Amino acid sequence: MVDATQGVQAQTLANVYLAMAAGLKIVPVINKIDLPAADIERVVAEIVSLLACRERDILLISAKTGEGVADVLEAVTKQIPPPVSSAEQITRGLIFDSYYDDYRGVILYVRVFDGEIAKGSHIKMMATGTEAITLEVGTLTPK
C-alpha cells in the first residue's frame, strides 16, 4: 500500500523486501488517489520499477471514499492462497481479544493456526502457564 502523495517510502521498501524474501504474493495498491496532491503517474512508475510488475496490476483506491476497495478485497481473495493448517498438528493459537462476562466468565477470541480446540479441551496459556478447560467453542462464519 503506497500513498499517492508520498510515493514509495523506506518502510514500504523494508516490508516489500521482507515479503519477497518470505515468498509472499505482493498485491500493489496505491491509496489516497482522491487527494489533490496525488501524483498517480509518478507513484505507478515507482512501483513498476520496484516490483517489475505491469501498470495494470496496480490497484488504485481511496480508502476514504471507498473507491476501489472492493477491487482490493477481490484481488486478495483471488491471488493470495489461504493458510495451510492441519488438525493433526499440535494446537497453536493466538488470543487476540478477551473480555469478562458476568455469567460466562472470561471470553477469549483465539486465532487457531494449527490443530483444533473443542469443548472440554485442556488449554495452557504459554506466557503465564495458566491452564483451563474450554466450556464453549464458537466459530465465526462470514456473512
Image (tube, rainbow, N blue to C red):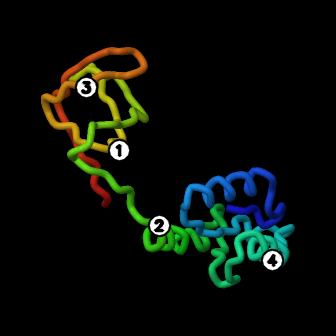
Cα separation between marks 4 and 1: 38 Å
Residue under pointer 4: 45
Q: Residue at x 44, y 68 (%)?
A: 77
Secondary structure beneath disc 3?
strand
Residue at left 22%, top 23%?
104
Judging by the rendered image, the residue that carries numbered circle 2 is 80
Badge 4 or badge 1: first in the primary sequence: 4
Amino acid type, callout 4: Ala
Q: Amino acid at mark 1?
A: Phe
Q: Residue at x 33, y 30 (%)?
A: 108
Residue at numbered disc 1: 113
- 4 left or right, relative to 124: right
Q: Would residue 46 be found to the left or right of residue 107 on screen?
A: right
Q: Residue at x 82, y 79 (%)?
A: 41
> In whole angstroms, how far apart are the C-alphas of marks 2 and 1?
17 Å
The C terminus appears in which quarter of the rendering? bottom left
Horizontal side, residue 46 vs residue 90: left or right: right
Circle 3 crowding by C-alpha within 10 Å: few under 14, some 14–19, many from 20: some
Identify the secondary structure beneath mark 4. helix
Question: Local crowd at mark 2 within 10 Å, few (<14), some, or many (≥20)?
Answer: few
